[in-house]
Image (tube, helix red, strand yellow):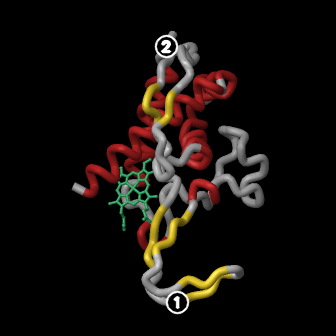
Amino acid sequence: MMMVFAGFETTTNLLGNGLLLLARHPDQAQTLREQPHLIPAAIEEMLRIEAPVQRLSRMAAADFELPDKRIRKGELMFLLTGAANHDFAPFPDPERFDIHRAPTGYLAFGDWIHTCPGAALARLGAEIAFTALLARSTSIPLAQPPRRHDNLSVRALKELSLTLT
Ligand code: HEM
């Protein structure tokens, strides 16, 4: 059941967030139509800039010190991975969607021992979907302003209305 829930909503949100990025950047969508081999790199950038999972939580297994804070064993911590994906040291001009950026080291799939085991499947699903959509469309502008879910952990669209030509 965890595989189904961890894999379904997240991938749905990658598709929604990615579609919105393509709708808002028609020039880059056109580049992807002309050069579909760039689609996998564009998906990495979608995952960085609009990560479906924005926040992870952990419970401290032991006391430890951060530069400005002491964490005690048992305390709950929220890790703002979505913010880390917009850190301008590794990602210059982080608010700019750039299909040529080919980002690495971003945290959309977590890190270390709990790194997402479904990452390859999610990337493959997104590549198939965006390749098919771009091949069969000439433009995908927004029909109405999108509406987002009000959620700090999950970056997800409630409604995305597009005009597909
Ligand atoms: C774009 C799609 C996806 C995103 C953004 C995503 C994101 C994540 C993140 C951030 C974690 C780490 C959670 C943590 O450290 O607390 C994670 C773990 C996990 N993901 Fe994904 N995921 C995606 C797709 C999938 C798919 C397709 C599957 C399964 C088919 C899956 C199954 C899991 C499972 C089972 C874990 C728990 C791993 C563990 O705790 O060791 N995910 N995912």
Q: Quadrant of residue 119?
A: bottom left
**Dot 1: element:** loop
Residue receiving disc 1: 63
Image depth: mark 1 or mark 2 in front: 1
Front position in the image: 6 or 83: 83
For image coordinates 28% across by 55% down, the residue present is 3
Q: Quadrant of the N terminus?
A: bottom left
For image coordinates 71% across by 43% down, the residue present is 95
Residue receiving disc 2: 164
**Image position of 123 with respect to 71: above or below:** above
Task: Name the spot of residue 155 as percent of width and height, x first.
Answer: 50, 44
**Image position of 29 with respect to 105: above or below:** above
User: What is the three-letter code of the residue carrying label 1?
Assistant: Asp
Front position in the image: 101 or 63: 63
Task: Name the spot of residue 34 as percent of width and height, x first.
Answer: 62, 23
Task: Name the spot of residue 163 as percent of width and height, x first.
Answer: 51, 12
